[in-house]
Image (cartoon, rainbow, N blue to C red):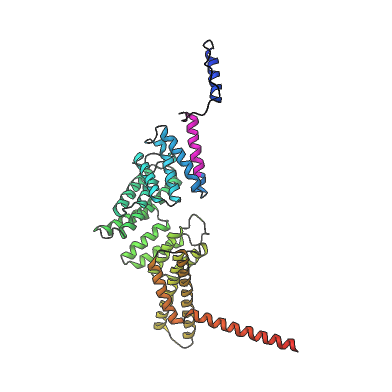
Amino acid sequence: MGKTRPLRKDLSEREKREKLKDLDRVLPDRPFPKKSKESKESVEELLTRSSALLQTSQAEKALPLALRALKWLEKEGNSLTSRVLPALSLLAEVHLELGDADQARSYFSQASQIDPDGLIPESQGGGVEKFLWLAQLSEEGGKDSVACFEKAIYILRNEISSASDSVSKAQKNRKLAAALCSVIEIYMTDLSWESDAESRCESLVTEAILVAPESPETLQTLANVRISQERIDEAAKALTDSLTLWKDLPSGDEGVPDFPTRISLARLLMEVEMENDAMEVLERLIEEDDTSVEAWYLGGWCAYLAAERSKASQKSAISGAGNTGVRESEYEASLMSSRDWLRNSIRLYEIQDYEDDRLRNHAMELVRDLDAQLGDANDEDEEDEAEAEVWESDSENEDQEMAGT
């Protein structure tokens, strides 16, 4: 393209402005975006598109859009201002979806430096979420995780005290209860050696029950604390109350706890000898996801415990002839069911290259014991195949005799 001619000096100011607009249309794009409403809208559009892709499980496509939005904001000198919070939060969520915990933690950390007290509204990328995630993503765990959770708890308490909307307040109460329960879990595991661990757990679970008395997760945590205190009857009641809240709800209902929470519930139910309830939970989990190694393993173990407990009770309660055979048949059926569940867990373990060796070793130990009681399942399969071959041979002979006549 030829050299652009200079504007004539005798043009009016209005004509000069019109000429400049014409030049804008024909000159190449500028190397940097203008600091205008147009650039701001472009950033918002990028973030909106990225968020939509993330919500439809397209994190790989969402990532470059969110990165472009962040770079654009940084070029405009907003790297340390609240304007970058939506981009930082979104990028952290994208990396979580991609399984990159380190990068997600980095973005959440940057966001926490810009909004250290969580005072910026969630709609602008601020709020409590980053501290909840930092607690879960902490490399150190233990006290570092507790510190992040305590920051989140402080923010949530303030938000609840100033909330006017009852729906929003209830949601924040549940989130607060979940954070309190997470701290309890840390004090029951990583920090169980702390001298005040039990008193801290008691104080935290009391507050959690007060703010969210009808939360299944909160009631499960209460049961876990009571089990550790050997207050089994109270633990069983809490678990029954937790299960009652959602067991009649359809799968997918928001009132039904997530899969990992129900796995934990099954374990707790087994600890307090509520095997029937535990099996109901596990059977429903298998209906939802029949590839869960842990659900199949727990179902097998649960059936094994139920069978052994039934056998022990029979020995002390048998009275009168005729019942022994029926009970023995039920006992054997429970053992066979246990072995089926456990064999499925071991098969899936191998297929998925599962990493919990203790689970596999225990499952195999139980299967060996069951084989010793019931006979090797492979022998039974061979007998079934032999019977099938005999039946097929007899059928062929009958067909030949009929054809001969």
Q: Position of residue 260 (x, y in %)?
A: 43, 60
**Number of marks drawn:** 0
Q: Is residue 62 above or below residue 248?
A: above
Instruction: Give the residue displayed 51% in from the left and 37% down from the top.
Output: 45
Q: Residue furthest top?
A: 10
Q: Kindly indicate the quadrant of the structure image that contains residue 240.
A: bottom left
Q: Is residue 45 magenta?
A: yes
Nearest the viewer among 111 and 331 is: 111
Q: Position of residue 117 (x, y in %)?
A: 34, 41
Instruction: Give the residue displayed 36% in from the left and 49% down from the top.
Output: 134
Q: Is residue 235 magenta?
A: no
Q: Is residue 241 above or below residue 138?
A: below
Q: Position of residue 379 (x, y in %)?
A: 50, 82
Q: Is residue 233 above or below residue 44?
A: below
Nearest the viewer among 282 and 358 is: 358
In the picture, which quadrant includes the N terminus?
Answer: top right
Nearest the viewer among 213 and 96 is: 96
Q: Which residues are magenta?
A: 27-51
Instruction: Give the residue displayed 42% in from the left and 58% down from the top.
Output: 216
Instruction: Give the residue displayed 37% in from the left and 65% down from the top.
Output: 235
Q: Is residue 277 visible?
A: no
